[in-house]
Image (cartoon, rainbow, N blue to C red):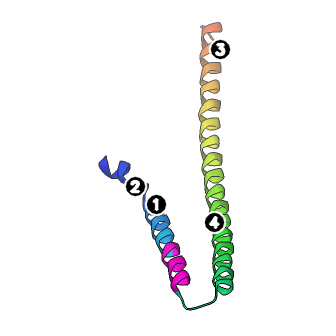
Amino acid sequence: MSDERCCSGSGGILLAFLAGGLVGAGLALLYAPVSGREARERIGGMAGDLKKKADEWTGEAKQKVEGFIDEERSVIKAAYDAGREAMAKEKARFENPNPQ
């Protein structure tokens, strides 16, 4: 149980690893012997790449969540239909207790 509270699975670890890598890359750019303009361009390029990857990850996560919701919706609908069918059978049985 304590493992569940500690982190949110491999996704959290991967996100922490990527964030650490980005911080390290940013610091390397700041301390690299290049002009300020070139450093800003590199950092801007990295920010653009990060935004693009984040958009891809959110798109993938959205697809997975939508797939999960569709699966759960079909399970709930099947259970609902089965319940209605059982209720109809019982209602018919009580309305007509002596079938001929």
**Label 4 Cα neighbours within 10 Å, binned few <14 / some 14-19 / many ≥20:** few
Name the residue that disc number 3 marks.
Answer: 92
Q: Secondary structure at mark 2?
A: loop
Cβ atoms under marks 1 and 3 closer than 8 Å: no
Whole-percent x, y for residue 10 in the image? 44, 63
Q: Give the CA distance from mark 2 to mark 3.
A: 53 Å
Name the residue that disc number 2 marks.
Answer: 7
Q: Which residues make up the magenta segment?
A: 22-31
Task: Give the mark toward the camera: 1 or 3.
Answer: 1
The disc label shown at residue 54, or none: 4
Q: Which SS type dominates the magenta stretch?
A: helix
Q: Earlier in the sequence, mark 2 or mark 3?
A: 2
Whole-percent x, y for residue 5 in the image? 37, 48
The amino acid on which the numbered mark 4 sits, given as a three-letter code, is Ala
The amino acid on which the numbered mark 3 sits, given as a three-letter code, is Ala
Name the residue that disc number 1 marks.
Answer: 12
Cβ atoms under marks 2 and 1 closer than 8 Å: yes
Q: Earlier in the sequence, mark 4 or mark 1?
A: 1
The amino acid on which the numbered mark 2 sits, given as a three-letter code, is Cys
Q: Secondary structure at mark 1?
A: helix
